[in-house]
Amino acid sequence: MIPEHSESRRAFLKGALAAGAVGAAMAAPGDADSVKAEVEKHHDANVRRLQTWIRQPSIAAENRGMNEGCALMMSMLGEAGFEAVTRVASSGQPGVFATLDAGASRTFGIYFMYDVKQADPAEWMSPPFDAAILDRAGLGKVLVGRGAVNQKGPQATLLAALNAFREAGRKPPVNLVFIAEGEEEIGSPHFSEIVQRPEVLAAFRKCEGIFMPMPMQSLDGTVTINLGAKGVIEVELIASGEKWGRGPKADVHSSLEAVVDSPAWRLIQALNTLVAADGHTPAIEGFADRARPLSADEKAMIRAAAAKQSEAVAMRGLGVEHWVHNVDWLESRELLAGRPTVNIEGLVGGYTGPGGKTILPHRAVAKLDLRLVPDMTAAGALAALKAHLTKKGFGDVEVKMSGGYDPTSTPKDSSVVKAAQTAYRQVGLDAVLWPRLAGSWPGYVFTGAPLKLPATHFGMGFGSGAHAPNEFYVIESANRNVVGFDAAARSYVDYLYALAAA
Amino acid sequence: MIPEHSESRRAFLKGALAAGAVGAAMAAPGDADSVKAEVEKHHDANVRRLQTWIRQPSIAAENRGMNEGCALMMSMLGEAGFEAVTRVASSGQPGVFATLDAGASRTFGIYFMYDVKQADPAEWMSPPFDAAILDRAGLGKVLVGRGAVNQKGPQATLLAALNAFREAGRKPPVNLVFIAEGEEEIGSPHFSEIVQRPEVLAAFRKCEGIFMPMPMQSLDGTVTINLGAKGVIEVELIASGEKWGRGPKADVHSSLEAVVDSPAWRLIQALNTLVAADGHTPAIEGFADRARPLSADEKAMIRAAAAKQSEAVAMRGLGVEHWVHNVDWLESRELLAGRPTVNIEGLVGGYTGPGGKTILPHRAVAKLDLRLVPDMTAAGALAALKAHLTKKGFGDVEVKMSGGYDPTSTPKDSSVVKAAQTAYRQVGLDAVLWPRLAGSWPGYVFTGAPLKLPATHFGMGFGSGAHAPNEFYVIESANRNVVGFDAAARSYVDYLYALAAA
């Protein structure tokens, strides 16, 4: 449907412009104001929408609430003005494809995810799926819950902005092509499949770029625009008596360690080859061979960013007292943007309960994530890890990849970036350009072939605790350096107008 | 009470012997037969008693069912003929002290434990606290349950033997001093405290030796007498951002591994210093300095034992295809008896659930047990481990010891050993003398100062799966190399008579 609509719309717009009408792309400043005025009026409903969303867990890793989570997001999209909202089957969890034809001349893409990370309620001060609004010292009223910042909070904020257009009786100034997946938190194993569907690909080919809503403000008063993101692979390393052909096939009494090989020790030894003696620098042979060093331009960006950002605020936020190797602030920023990593997410083997249990386990597992910079690839990282283990004599240690993404890069003169600079400038913020988000997202599906679209993150607001207990998102800010829900929603209105004009 | 009783008994016996009466220590062979005849008659009640025991979990590590388990065992002791059965408070779980004054001239000690290891029902073919009796190929009818072999099964078998004396209207041929603890599976942290109580110590000072019931038959047809046991310490090694002063104090997003130190990698590196490059040989400095090499006499015992035992049966039982370093059967037996070990029981850090979770954990833990040979000590091993970590630069890695024992040694000409040889010989078995059990038990409380008593394990029968899923104990044997419950109970009758005559 989309191509025909676009054609007829384009024809209409040509005529309108020829007749001197004001097109959607040339909205008067008053248009944005009338839309933004709706945000505050509907504050309670907007926040309730986010609470409803968080109260519906959708955890791909546990295959929990996925159908319900998908359906709920689809109904929210319909409410926000998307005309065609389609559930797209994949080999895994379904995706969602939607379009909003605003009759505008320009079209941009939006990426959402409807899954969240797992949460252990025992670790939370407020239950992770209660979405309680609590006071947080120095910040104001925050919504606490799994997905609060990653990504239901910012996504609900963008939806509030789209609803504001409807409430103001207007169309957004750009057409929107929307795609979402439900497996982001397990490494997006089927997202490429969803985007490769002909109707989806055709719709995205009409886009000038895509963005993902994300609160980009920092407590030090800066706001950041990412020109890319690291890639990642998530893997399990499994040492077992069965694959090794040594040690037991089932747990045995620990006294037998005198005569029986230990898969747990084997795992420790295999792991120990993956980083250098400093306990940090990746030592997987070939892993980072294609890692492109930071360019002079990127280093300059980082230098400018580090000068604006606060080291003390960053350290306090993370609860750390030193950066690795005691590097200084500038160098820590270069590492964050430029360095591939090998991280242990989890260790699990043998007896993991309280106290001890004198067994020799037949199996032990390390959960790792490896972050990648251009021009590394997820496939290349996996191959290097496997080859390295084999070369080091640990070919029996299984490597099970659960998901991963290639890194992404977006030019700083692309319309999605320039529009972000414009929108932030409207609220008095000179955005920090940042070469590469240290986290990862499946943006490579857009930035890579065949679409090769610019892609970035946009949004005001603040939250923290992604993947950790007590994840939160600021609803009413008491901190002058970050805005609350309503101002963040208004920033999306500004961004859409800026995209139309970029 | 015991000392007075003993004194009056001794006075009585002196008179009786002087008058030519046959003392308990000189029972006619027919006496044992009449007692043993009761075992089969009461088979069902004896097995039900064991089932009742197993159906009452007492797991010190989980502080589960301890009072109930203690009370249940106390009632069983009363039923079996112990006159004074006392619950002995300790700083941890209570112990049980009991005496059976048979009016005999000789007195021996018995050690029981009423706790069992934890059990995860999901791993069992039959629920661990159901105590179901199932057919097991090649073995016969076995009772499956936590504690079946370690140690409720053999303990219930000894109780069946004591009940048989009562049922035959007789007293055992030796006086018995009984002590039990409820914390064996967490390293007996308070057992010494229980034995050091004046009334307990006084009773044990009258003993010539002590034994622990244990099924010592092997599927290769041999039966073994241990002349000691390895010691052990159980410890947790904990790496954390908090103690380290580096890395995060709470889990953070894994992308931050580029700039934040990882306690999980620190744990891996600390662990890696504990064993040599072979992934097995202890490399903790000073740990084994006092390890006494096997003597020529011990090596000769091992050689004789290895010639009688079957390597194929041992490998099959453990589910292994190679011994460490591919050593041969004889050398594997020397390692089993003579080698200190450093074993990983469990690894637990960060995210341990299904799939992955992109966090950088602030804390990671390894659960270890270290086995000790004479003249190493538990205290010395702990000190060596701590000093080693500090010297290697890992002084921040916490070492939390949950319990441990010194190794034990018992002379082969002690009465508890000689009587065991006699009792086994009565059923046609030439027992294998074994220098040292590779497992551990708190026998050092008896063999060390101030008691310095010989101590060993005795028992016919067979079971397996201690500390593992599907632990079992043979009730009715279909295997010619091992006996079932009744014959094992009869062996305890023989042993008590042999102790009286040793």
Image (cartoon, coloured by chain):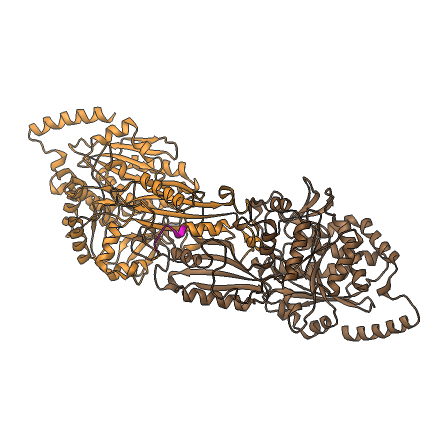
Chain colours: A brown, B orange
Location of residue B100 by image quarter:
top left
- Image x and y of residue B418, in percent: 15, 43
* Looking at the image, residue B466 lies above or below residue A299: above
Which residue sits at x=83%, y=75%?
Answer: A8
Is residue B474 in view from this perspective?
A: no
* Looking at the image, residue B124 lies above or below residue B26: below
Q: Is B37 left, or right, of B191 in this rendering?
A: left
Which residue sits at x=27%, y=36%?
Answer: B445
Q: Is A291 left, or right, of B158 in this rendering?
A: right
Q: Is B190 left, or right, of A21 in this rendering?
A: left
Point out the image quarter for the C terminus of chain B. top left
Magenta run includes residue A84: no
Location of residue B135 by image quarter:
bottom left
Q: Is A455 left, or right, of B187 in this rendering?
A: right
Magenta run includes residue B274: yes
Point out the image quarter for the N terminus of chain B. top left
Taken as a whole, is the magenta stretch helix, strand or loop?
Answer: loop
- Image x and y of residue A361, in percent: 38, 54
Is residue B446 in view from this perspective?
A: yes
Front residue of this view, candidates A320 and A379: A320
Front residue of this view, candidates A483 and B463: A483
- Image x and y of residue B291, in percent: 25, 45
Query: What are the residue bounds of the magenta stretch?
Result: B271-276
Which residue sits at x=47%, y=46%?
Answer: B239
* Looking at the image, residue B324 lies above or below residue B156: below
Q: How many marks?
A: 0
Front residue of this view, candidates A100 and B56: A100
